[in-house]
Image (cartoon, rainbow, N blue to C red):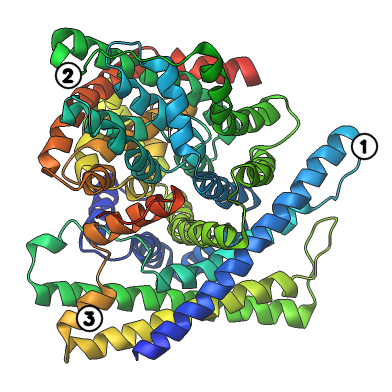
Amino acid sequence: MQASLKWFGSIARACAIVGGWALMAISVATCVEVIGRKYFSFSFRGLDEIGGYMLAGVSAFGFAYALSTRAHMRVTLLFPYVSTSVQSLLNVLATLTLAAMAAFCAWRGIFEVLDAWLSGKRSNTPLQTPLWIPLTVWFTGMLLFAAGTIFMAWHSLSLLFRDRAQLNRLYGPQSMEEEVSTEIGHAEAREGRGSRA
Amino acid sequence: MIDIASVTIGFLILLGAMTLGLHIATVMFGVGFIGAALYLGWPGVNSMIVVYLGSMDEAVLLQLPLFILLGEILVRCGATDRMYRSLTDWLNRLPGGLLHTNVAASALFSAVSGSSVATAATISTVALPAFKKKSYDTRMVLGSIAAGGSLGNLIPPGIALIIYGVLTNTSVARLYAGGVFPGALLTVMFMATIVLLTWWRPSIAPREVVTDPMLVRLKRLVDLLPPVLIFVIVMGSIYGGWATSTEAAALAVIVTLPIAAFYGRLSIKMLHDAFLSTVNLTALSMLILAGAFALNFILGLLGVTAALTKFVASMNVTPLQLIYILFAFYVILGTFFETLPMMVGTLPLVHPLIVAAGIDPVWFGIFLVLMCEISLISPPVGLTLYVIQAVRNEGSIGDVFRGTIPFFITMLLMTVLLIHFQELALWLPRLAFG
């Protein structure tokens, strides 16, 4: 179980890094575009369209990555005031609803991709992008996200009857302490200081 | 179509489900879904999904990851302590000394980083050791860092302004222009707060003016360049009219690379770390935003805007009264909620409301961001405060809470000023864009 979670995490992490390079690439292209337009009356045309596709791809794979880092935001207001068993129920409810949403979107995504594939639809822009290309990338990300949420929903549900402490640890919202120590870890790493004594 | 009672129930369900700890993204999507299914049936659900999925490749939203990325790279350049040093050179003559440096460094840093929490973490890591051997009032030290960090979203470019702009279809460039004066004014007001408190109680800050020779200080000014450069590139390219706000973000991302190289921090590992944080933050925001778009769309179809307009007309409140009601509402909500849920959770209802009342959307964007900043430093839920306390690693969180009180009051004062002198936020956008 834990091993599969780890696997999922490292796949999503690799995808996120690729996404980062994609953002870098679009930044370079945009610089060329802006300078070209200003001084050489030259333009790529349709760069913003590609930017849109890129955003969708980065987001879809990013959903999966943020899932693996437990970053998807939840309000933790109630948690300190309820017992751990109520907490575990709320956690299961959260993973189940998230999985339901992700699965629904992935299911809808199938039709979008199939439609684009079968009809050979192109974007209604000067670029005339064959839509199956960006849609397939986006859909793969959504599929990864859906697979992750479904796995976690099932795992949390099974933990509900076996090990609630583990359930709350794995699927509870990030506690204030965790978030704080992550932020400080980042800041210290950035400023090149060791961990506090 | 829909009456105001059902709208209120829907809104309470939304807040209730969020409080139960469901994912914010699921709640936004779910409430839209239920509303569509109940009132419009399957066709409604269908068109909502089209909007939901379509919002993910919205080209204007590309500026969100780009601005996050530029901040992530810049904070990893490790130049913060030098920046802090250079600001100290010029600010330590003011009564309050290093306390001003806290505010100014945070303001400068957060202007480009876009994240108040990251700003607070970085500045306190750099600043707190500097205070170790000095006899400053601890609470004021902590309070000034927290207050400075909260300037982040108001001074452009900021992530909160992008999210507001995209969600409400308000020009991000106008919002940036709108944030300049209120951001600068609030910085000055924070500094004035420190000066006044120091006059009132001189024990807060020791008078010790050690100045290095002018030449040394001038040389160190170089360390202030990176954030200033980014600010100038972004604002200059937008207002020079040769780049959109998305393009400006892309330009700034590229400019951070030579800066990182200059400080010897440019490496594949550093970039990958920056990518991971960027994708993480982008994804969690995008999932929530897509839900907010879908919910907005459904509320439009259901005629909520019309219902709210009628409601406002029947209530007989003046725009000014409405603003004060929202002011109180947001300050209370802000003590419990973080910035992003507070914004996306309320905007679908509040935005039509203010438009109906004839309030300028650009002005309201600045107002709302100020409300978010207040929520960041109002206990008991304010991540910034806990981050500062954890870096400090001694004493109690109560010191941080008490230290922010003067600045909290200053922010309330600023809000009142903004409410009564709306030109503060509207003059520059009008000058720049007509």
Q: Residue at x 24, y 55 (%)?
A: A197
Q: Examine the rendered structure and indicate whether residue B256 appears above or below residue B272.
A: above
Secondary structure type for disc 3: helix
Chain assignment, label 1: A
> How far across and how far down the image is residue B151, in percent?
38, 31
Residue B271 seen in the figure: yes
Label 2, label 1: how many angstroms apart (C-alpha)? 58 Å
> How far across and how far down the image is residue B370, in percent?
35, 30
> How far across and how far down the image is residue B428, in percent?
55, 17
The residue carrying mark 3 is A167
Secondary structure type for disc 1: loop
The residue carrying mark 2 is B204
The residue carrying mark 1 is A40
> In the visual, does B260 lie left or right of B186?
right
Q: Residues within 10 Å of mark 3 (few under 14, many from 20)?
A: many
Q: Examine the rendered structure and indicate whether residue B183 appears above or below residue B311.
A: above
Q: Examine the rendered structure and indicate whether residue B357 appears above or below residue A137.
A: above
Chain assignment, label 3: A
Chain assignment, label 2: B
Q: Residue at x 58, y 67 (%)?
A: A17
Q: Amino acid at mark 3?
A: Leu
> In the visual, does A162 lie left or right of B149?
left
Q: Amino acid at mark 2?
A: Ile
Label 3, label 2: how many angstroms apart (C-alpha)? 48 Å
Label 3, label 1: how many angstroms apart (C-alpha)? 60 Å
